[in-house]
Amino acid sequence: KGSDGKYTVSLIEGDGIGPEIAQSVKDIFTAAAAPIKWESISVDPVFKDGKQSIPDAAIESIRRNYVALKGPLATPIGKGHVSLNLTLRRTFNLFANVRPCKSIQGYKTPYDNVDTVLIRENTEGEYSGIEHVVVDGVVQSIKLITREASERVLRFAFQYAQDVGRLKVRAVHKATIMKMSDGLFLSVAQRISKDYPHVDFDAELLDNACLKIVSDPTPYNDKVLVMPNLYGDILSDMCAGLIGGLGLTPSGNIGDECSIFEAVHGSAPDIAGQGLANPTALLLSSIMMLQHMGLFEHAERIQAAIFKTLAEGTTITGDLGGKAKTHEYAQAVIGNL
Ligand code: NAD
């Protein structure tokens, strides 16, 4: 916090629609007099010792400020490109990815009572990046599960459940098939649960969880779901689908020191630069950020204005069936503050 009473936050505007949706966040935060000063940083890759890396200035900014808001970063598909998103997660050891999905009044979907919270292990599992050719035509990819990373994300999930008063934690796994790797995750979950006597704990198979959530999401409204990396990736997008898609879903990447908040969606190259993007997901990510910083009143006020604008339904973006441009939607939110 600076002498002006404002907190400096690193801002990565990102690629594609990133700068357009980041502008909406900046405009709305200014109008709401949120005590945030943005420090814009670029994470355009540089090469250090022959390896792709993030510029030092960006790393220093996030280390100094502890908190960053990030737009989407485009990742070229194929060989030789390490995802910058993965690099950021690894650099700051952002071990837990929190993804809430809550139905939004005014946007009709098959269920109007979705309220899921999913915590995804963010550093290992199927994303360990260990793949190799055994012989021509045979590729081996290693899913790495460690006691240390499992314990870290599970402890975070129980602590989160306790802090937000959502007192049921459910581990989602496939230990019937992956007996050792998911088995380890599950046994760590059972052990950690003993440290949280006020939080209920149970476990569910991934396939069953998918079937049940899309059949009736209501029983999940009081739970925090926690799971290994890939399961969380897929299941959270499925939950996003239940509330109306990627334009609405926020997330937080949490580490011991630094945290980076970002929308779940990508850079949407198909609509970039046209003022068509929905900034709600990045806005809701910035609300998670304010809550993480303890700025609850500002979070509540901006969130209420967003939900009111969406519920009115007159000034919403194309992905939600409206005709508004990104900045027109932002102006409507400002009008509702
Ligand atoms: P995407 O999320 O960018 O787009 C999928 C579809 O959803 C597109 O039709 C797009 O127009 C639409 N969409 C996404 N966000 C929207 C928004 N805010 N408002 C309105 N419509 C929206 O996924 P993709 O096309 O698979 O990926 C594009 C690029 O983004 C790739 O390079 C990918 O690697 C990257 N990506 C980055 C992140 C991240 O930075 N966290 C996440 C996912 C994908």
Image (spheres, grey):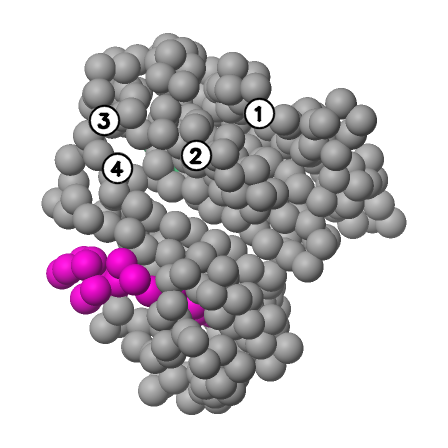
Which circle marks residue 34 in the picture? 1
**Ligand 1 within 8 Å of the CB at mark 2:** no
Residue type, label 4: Ile
Q: Alpha-carbon neighbours of circle 2 within 10 Å: few (<14), some, or many (≥20)?
A: some
- First along the sequence among labels 1 and 3: 1
User: Residue under circle 2?
Assistant: 300
Q: Compute the Cα span from label 4 to label 3.
A: 8 Å
- Give percent across and percent down for residue 5: 72, 27
Q: Secondary structure at mark 3?
A: helix
- The magenta span reads 210-230
Q: Taking 322 as reference, is 259 above or below it?
A: below
Residue 197 in the image: state x and y as whole percent: 45, 81
- First of labels 2, 3 by sequence position: 2
**Residue at image location 63% in from the left, 26% down from the top:** 35
Q: Position of residue 109 (x, y in %)?
A: 16, 40
Q: Do the residues under discs 4 and 3 have CB atoms within 8 angstroms?
A: yes
Residue occupying the far right of the picture: 49
Q: Tell me the SS state at disc 1.
A: loop
Is 90 situated above or below 168? above
Q: Alpha-carbon distance for marks 2 and 4? A: 15 Å
**Which of the labelled discs sits on residue 104, or is there none?**
4
Q: Amino acid at mark 3?
A: Ala
